[in-house]
Structure formats: structure tokens, C-alpha cells
Amino acid sequence: TAGVTKDGTLWSWGDGFYSQLGHGDRKPRERPERLGREMFGRSPAVMVACGCNYTLVLTTAGLVWSCGHGNDGQLGHGNTADQLVLMLVAAKYFRRTHIVMVAAGFAHSVAVGADGRVWTWGWNIHGQLGHNDEENRLVPTQLAGEALGGSAA
């Protein structure tokens, strides 16, 4: 479980077996524990999304950070490794677009840019990424315009 307070502080608690809490270990937390801004570039958090054993954080800078279980590429770092602490999802994948929303599914992730463009990555066994195939993506991949009816989200 994770939450963001009004001042942009990120807190997480619960099961930490896959390091999804972002504290640098795999220990559970029975009460909310603060994650300092130094964990994600000193920028305040504005949104957090929790998937199955992984976490996405969006900061005021429009950057996406992730940690936890990476078995299907849902962390967006180009591999399937677990991440013990929040790690920046490279901005180059978003074509330097300011991200304004993130969502976490079972093992797939979504980001929406200020311009309406949509990126998805992770597990895709049922086509849930929206790329007209069933191939996993290890990095954020922009949806084609026609996937959204020829318009932005």
C-alpha cells in the first residue's frame, strides 16, 4: 500500500517481499513509513499507483519512478529484474513528454502525457497493452494514434 500526502511526501506500508515498498529491502511495514524525496530526485510526488507487487510514482517534474517486482517488464527499465528502491523510468521512452498520470495493472503499466499521448509496458498476454499483439514490453511504448481512435487520450 502507498499514499501521497498534500505536501508530496510518499508513504508505503504492507508486504515488502518483492521490494515494492521502495525502502531498499524486502521487509514488511506494519505502519506507514516515509520515503524521502531523495528517493525520487527530490521532486514531490503527486501520484502513486500500486500493481501486483510493484509501485509506480509520478512526481511534479512529470517523471515516473518504479520499484518492486519486475518479472514481466512492468517497471519499465528494459529488463525483468526486481528493483529494491525507486528507480527513474528513463524520460527518453516518453519522448521528453511531461507525464501527468500513471496506472498500475496486475503486471502492466500505463502513463499519460500532458499532450494526451499514452504509453504502456509490461505483461501483455491478453493484449492489455493495446499494441495489437500479445508481446510483453520491457520499456514504455507509445500507443499508435489509431489505437485510440485517431486521437489523443
Image: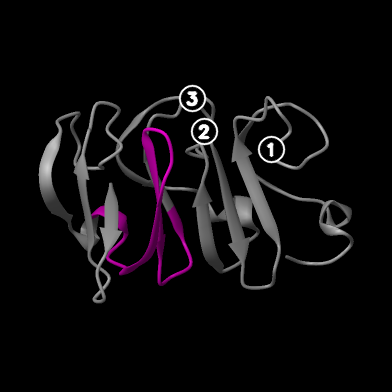
- Which is nearer the N-term, disc 3 or disc 2? 3
Q: Which residue is mark 3?
A: 80
Q: Label 2 neighbourhood size at 10 Å, few (<14), some (14-19), many (20+)?
A: many
Element under label 3?
loop
Segment colored magenta = 39-64
Image quadrant of residue 51? top left
Q: Nearer the viewer, residue 59 or 133?
A: 133
Q: Which residue is mark 1?
A: 128
Residue at (42, 25) in percent of width and height: 81
Left or right of 12? Residue 143 is right
Q: Nearer the viewer, residue 8 or 140?
A: 8
- Which is nearer the N-term, disc 1 or disc 2? 2
Q: CA distance from mark 3 to mark 2?
A: 11 Å
Give the amino acid at mark 1.
Gln
Does the magenta portion include 54?
A: yes
- Circle 1 or circle 3, nearest the eye: 1
Q: Position of residue 72 (x, y in %)?
A: 53, 26
Image quadrant of residue 43? bottom left
Q: Nearer the viewer, residue 116 or 138?
A: 116
Which of the labelled discs sits on residue 148, or is there none? Answer: none
Element under label 1?
loop
Q: Position of residue 150 (x, y in %)?
A: 89, 62
Q: Nearer the viewer, residue 26 or 92?
A: 26
- Circle 3 or circle 2, nearest the eye: 2
Residue at (50, 35) in percent of width and height: 106
Q: CA distance from mark 1 to mark 2?
A: 10 Å
Give the amino acid at mark 2.
Ala
